[in-house]
Image (spheres, grey):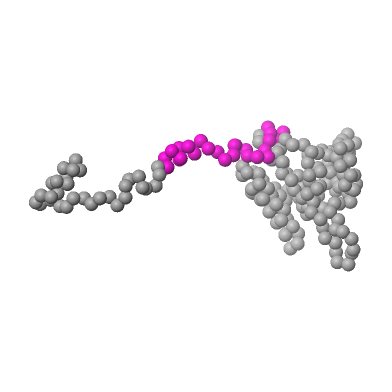
Amino acid sequence: MLATLTRVAGGRGVGEAAPRLARPPGAGRPDRLGACLARLGFRPRQKGGAKTGANPTDKGKAGSKRHVVSDRGGIPLAVVLTAANVHDSKVLEEAVDAIEPIKRPLGKPGRPRKRPKKLHADKAYDFPRCRKALRRRGITPRIARRGIDSSERLGRHRWVVERTLAWLARYRRLSVRYERRDDIHEAFLHLGCSLICLNYLS
């Protein structure tokens, strides 16, 4: 049909033949339909994301748990994120080792102290291995004993870290975990701890 139209265009009363295409049809962008269809079933993370597990206190729903170490004023010194089904005692050493060294005041010689002299913890850490791990690091354990210490009160010192956890829960981004990537949620968690320190300084 194109050859016939070219001959007709040479006659009287008909316009010139259509010019040749500027580029062949195959020179354009490649067809991306197959690539789009291939991504329909792709998920970067499964539902729940990393560092999530069955929460024993919330009907087995997937959740995370934050482990916080604070000073006697409630200022967070270290924070660790794990799945909700990870026992607290298994994260004790990691949380203690995550404490950053504190600079000594001017005029006082010696190396900066990295670990506290003593550590108060609740009954979830009442295991011989936890006490041995603290003593190896030169820390005196002050852990509530199961079956001996009353569970009706948080204790004279242990309520401080519970208050720090309540401060973190005030931030809407931390009250419920929305991110499937654990590193993003940890970034918001560290940001919340920074805001607590800023409020304390101000």
- Along the line of sight, which residue is nearer the eye, 95 or 171? 95
| Residue at x 79%, y 51% (from the top left corner) | 99
Please indicate, yes or no, whether residue 58 appears anywhere in the rendered image.
no
Residue 31 located left or right of residue 126: left
Quadrant of the snapshot with the N terminus: top left
Please indicate, yes or no, whether residue 88 appears anywhere in the rendered image.
yes
Q: Position of residue 5 (x, y in %)?
A: 16, 45
Place residue 136 in its image quadrant: top right
By secondary structure, the bulk of the magenta-drawn segment is best described as loop
Q: Is residue 154 magenta?
A: no
Q: Position of residue 137 (x, y in %)?
A: 88, 47
Instruction: Give the magenta range.
Output: 32-60
Place residue 199 in its image quadrant: bottom right
| Residue at x 78%, y 49% (from the top left corner) | 98
Q: Is residue 46 magenta?
A: yes
| Residue at x 63%, y 39% (from the top left corner) | 49
Count of number-bearing discs: 0
| Residue at x 72%, y 59% (from the top left corner) | 198
Q: Position of residue 154 (x, y in %)?
A: 83, 43
